[in-house]
Image: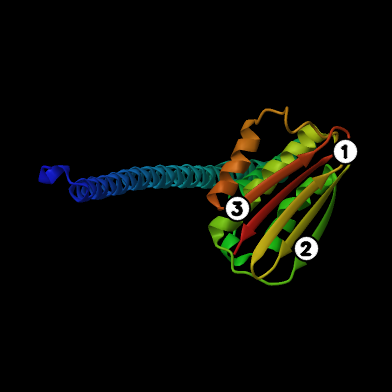
Amino acid sequence: MEAWQKPETIILWIIIVGIFLVVLLTAIIFLVRAIFKKIIKAKEKEAKTQLAYQQNLLETTIKTQEIERHRIAADIHDALIGKLTAIKMEQEITQKDQKTIDALHDSIAIARRISHDLSPPLIEFTKLPELIKELLYPWEQHIQIKAIYDIRYETNETDDFKVQITRIIQEIITNIVKHAEAEEVIFHLKQTKNYMVLRIIDDGKGYDVSQQSKGLGTKNIETRVQYLRGNYKVKSNLGKGTSNMFLFEN
């Protein structure tokens, strides 16, 4: 019998081939895992790059909007209000027409309110609750507003944060007055050491959230919430009003 035909030799070769196959299979598995890991890391890097780009684009867009708002507010305050005031003083001196004087007075008040809404003055020295009170005051002439301020911890918000919150509130209140046909709005601000919750609830006609297409106002709200890295939930039912809730972690 040839040596290679001996059972011991055949078993040895089977063991060698088996070991080789195991080593080959293990190498293939490690190679495949390494390739998948590389692909996953590449995808994660691409996703992070895309997210960073979107975040930078979002920040640039919002900052550009605020710069333009500030410019328009300055033009209204320095140019328009100044000219209206000069005309009003001339009318008062000459006492030509009281109706014209009253109309100019109202126009100046409207221009100041618009300028204030576009760029709140002394925002760096004003706490958020006080800023919101000033913001809500003119709307109280159009709709009943019940404001609740639950301030358990005074946080030092940035000017940018306060501006974005005021923009969100302006958008919500404007939508309520224009579209909701509401009689009352409940405004609830809660501040703690760890988070801030803002709820705006109206008793208006409501709408089907699943069927309602997002308008420019809603998209602006979502954009600003995303910019502030917060969370936004809206609940609404036909005939039962709408609830907007915002959560921002400190």
Q: Earlier in the sequence, mark 2 or mark 1?
A: 2
Q: How many numbered dots are placed on residues in this image?
A: 3
Measure the C-alpha gap from mark 3 to mark 2. 20 Å
Residue appearing at x 56%, y 47% in the figure: 226
Q: Which residue is tagged 2? A: 149
Q: Earlier in the sequence, mark 3 or mark 2?
A: 2
Amino acid of disc 1: Lys
Residue appearing at x 50%, y 45% in the figure: 62
Counting from the top left corner in percent of width and height, residue 115 is at: 61, 46
Question: Looking at the rendered structure, which numbered label has been put on residue 230?
Answer: 3
Residue appearing at x 62%, y 42% in the figure: 221
Q: Is residue 105 visible?
A: no
Q: Which residue is tagged 1? A: 240
Q: Nearer the viewer, residue 171 or 92?
A: 171
Amino acid of disc 3: Gly
Question: Pointer 3: residues within 10 angstroms few (<14), some, or many (20+)?
Answer: some
Q: Is residue 2 left or right of residue 113?
A: left
| Secondary element at image label 1 | loop
| Secondary element at image label 3 | loop
